[in-house]
Image: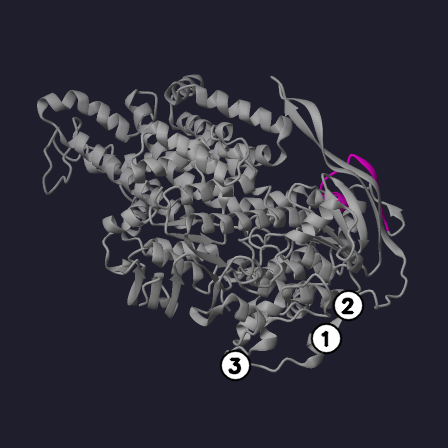
Amino acid sequence: MNKNSLWKDAFYRLAQDKLALISILIVFLYFFVALFSGLGWIASNWSQEVGASNLAPSFDHLLGTDIFGRSVLQKVIRGTQVAMSVGAAAALIAIPIGVILGALAGYFGGWIDDFVTWLYTTFSSVPNIMLLISITLILGKGIFSVYVALGATSWVNLCRLIRGEVLKHKEREYVQAAGAIGGGHMRKLFRHILPNVSHIVIINTSMQFQTAIKSEVILSYLGLGVQGEPSWGTMIDDAKLELVRGVWWQLAGATLAMFFILLAFNILGDALRDALDPKLKGK
Amino acid sequence: MSLNNLLSVKNLTVEFQTSEGIIRAVNNISFDIPQGKTIGIVGESGSGKSVTSLAVMGLLQKPAARIPSGEIYFNGQDLLKLNEQQMRAIRGNDISMIFQEPMTSLNPVFKVGEQISEALRVHKNLSKKEAWEKAVHLMNQVGIPNPSSSAHKYPHEMSGGQKQRVMIAMAISCDPKLLIADEPTTALDVTIQKQVLELLQKLQQEYKMSMMFITHDLGVIGDIADDVVVMYRSNVVEKNHAQTIFHSATHPYTKGLLACRPKLGANPRRLLTVSDFMTESGEEKIVPVERVQVFDKEQEVKSESQILLEVDQLVTQFPIKGGLFGRTVDHFKAVDGVSFKLKKGQTLGLVGESGCGKTTLGRSILRLVEPSAGKIIYDGKDITHVYHEELRQLRKKMQIIFQDPYSSLNPRMTITDILTEPLNIHKVGANKNERFDMARELIEKVGLKSNHMSRYPHEFSGGQRQRICIARALMLRPEFVICDESVSALDVSIQAQVLNLLLDLQQEFGLTYIFISHDLSVVNFIADEVGVMYAGKIIEMDKASRIYKNAKEEYTRSLLSAIPKGLARETRP
């Protein structure tokens, strides 16, 4: 049996890219840290005092302690949980909306297309951060509103891409051939066209994930994000006042944690695009 | 090396480094192009002909490609020893090239006049104004009407043939000594192809250029080449004067290539293919006498059968949007009042140039495009206005095979999935295994191996993919099949095999075909009756054997005369 599908080809291409493999490793590491933290296996006692206030990093406290004597490392880990869950939740909300609206608009055209196009142009004409702030203000502070706010803003890009690709693919002869053998709209759209545009969802999700993480940090920094939980954003906010006293470790911990995951997602996104859509390579 | 050879390729070998190891694309080939002569390089896709031309131009992708041995002498200078900068001075100046696809070779955001003058300004150091004047002069020479105003046009405002003329004007703008033409007419209609060939020939004599003409179709080359080089699987298998090649070819592959193109007159019952002349390993075979025997379609008595399809005054129009709010301002009639009758088991051929409405007619009959007026009567039943379930049932009986074997198969589905899908839709076959068996039976009928069925479309060649498309169309055992340019994208040698397959299947399953093509010789071979389409109308319709003997319409005659004869022209003094 020779199962040499396009997905497998893409996988081999990805496996040859060392940088991409390292990125995947980093993403998995963050994922498991977030998962274990969520399950309460690690950093569950983050709110407890472990030493004196504002201890510099040492062997006992790898990233030092904050003003209340809590471990900064544990706070970074809790922050990872928040960041990753926000990224995942935003993707879970954005993908179905973006894919379904984009596919319907591209395939059926007409008033459906007009409506969807109007919807996403309206959304994208408002600066993203303003939209995020207004949604969290309406829904109230807290992590749940961050999920909804990010999900509601990040489907726009995906929807636009999917619509364009579906528009291109529906004219292809293989879709016409599916019609000629008696296939209906749903078969043409879901069995034939969507598998051919699904790589866009994967590439876009990896890009969107980092946007969501960044947005969460910004919202939390502005005090609109998670409440009563450590987040990279609130840690950076705290550092504002601490830096003058030479307490740099809270800022360093949060930004480094953010730096590595954003870099990993960035590289992974590019690598995924090269692997799944070889035509775009080098452009 | 004799002095009057402009280009002399000696023992050239080109290899490509791929993930599967080293592939030898060109194997130890030698040929010469004398001053002021044209040589044709013929071979099917993958035979190494384009790689040869890229090697001459110094355009091979390095480091994937390497040239382990060989010399390419141009004007006494070994091109392979030159560095990139020296090569750039020669490329576009002394050697220039025309590509196959005029649609994508021009930059859409610049006026054509600017694009022609750009080359002149780079290589000849002309001022902007001088270059523009020269460009207009060149456009006049390549036969573009109103050159001074046409120079201000953008590429999308020109037809395919005109764009190819612009490409030729660019290629000859710096008075090249050698012009390489890589399948320059393959994407064009026959009548335009003829004009472009005549133009190239005229220019070659005027400018005293040498020309290297690459094609997969021996028929095209007969009119233009002095010498012919035949390439097969990276090797030169035969080279000689065009006259000699056409009249007494020695290599079995050349004989096969010459025989596989359908002729306008009588043909054998099944076209001869390369495999009739040589075995897989390249040894010569004796062609059985009955294979060569031509037969006259008019002599053949097909038993009178009933009418399967009747099309009455069919009109299909598309709205033209315009104005500020995109209202429909007018209609474009792609099919304009077409009527014909087709008997069971017969083949109707539809010929015409691109844009004449033949494809829309085919799609309208299948109701893939909604006709605007007229009637389609299939098997005694008016199907112009059936919908939903009834239309779905109709799809079982009527099928279509598309032109492009690359885009008509879903790249994410295996061959098994592709072939069993129609069975799933129509709930034919009791279970998965039964459907798989039905697919396997057909895949073997169309000449593929059943152990290929778990593969994906991109693992097959163009000809094999078209066989898969044919198998898919036949899965539901239709009575009626529309072949829409189904062999146009294939090399001539593959085209003959697919045409034979279509005829075999017609005989076996009693199929009725509508065969749409721009190539009259193909239609003449396969069809019982031929309809010539022009601007949405069938302007002439007759028995295939009669239409080429005494065509009544001027347009039909011009189509006929444009077909390459597949014969060498008289040697020039």
Please tell me which of labels 1 and 3 falls first in the chain.
3
Q: Which residue is mark 3?
A: B283
Query: In the picture provided, is A281 more to the left or to the right than A178?
Result: left
* Element assignment for label 3: loop
Q: Which residue is mark 1?
A: B293
Give the numbered dot on residue A84: none
Q: CA distance from mark 1 to mark 3?
A: 23 Å
Against B435, is B252 above or below?
below
Q: Chain of mark 2?
A: B
Q: Does the rendering let one see residue B421?
A: yes
Q: Which residue is mark 2?
A: B507
Percent position of residue B547, x then y = 78, 55
Q: What residue is rendered at 24% in x and 50% in y?
A: B86
Quick one: quadrant of the C terminus of chain A?
A: top left
Q: Nearer the viewer, residue B106 or B363?
A: B106
Three-letter amino acid code at the position of disc 3? Glu
Q: Chain of mark 1?
A: B
Residue B13: image quadrant is bottom left
Residues behind callouts 1 and 2 on a single chain:
yes
Hey, what amino acid is under mark 1? Answer: Gln
Q: Is residue B18 visible?
A: no
Name which residue lies at 56% across and 27% down.
Answer: A116
Label 2 vs 3, first from the N-terminus: 3
In this rendering, position of residue B512 left or right of residue B55: right
Residue B504 placement (x, y as % from top left): 72, 68
Q: Earlier in the sequence, mark 1 or mark 2?
A: 1
Q: Residues within 10 Å of mark 3 (few under 14, many from 20)?
A: few
Q: Secondary structure at mark 1?
A: loop
Q: Chain of mark 3?
A: B
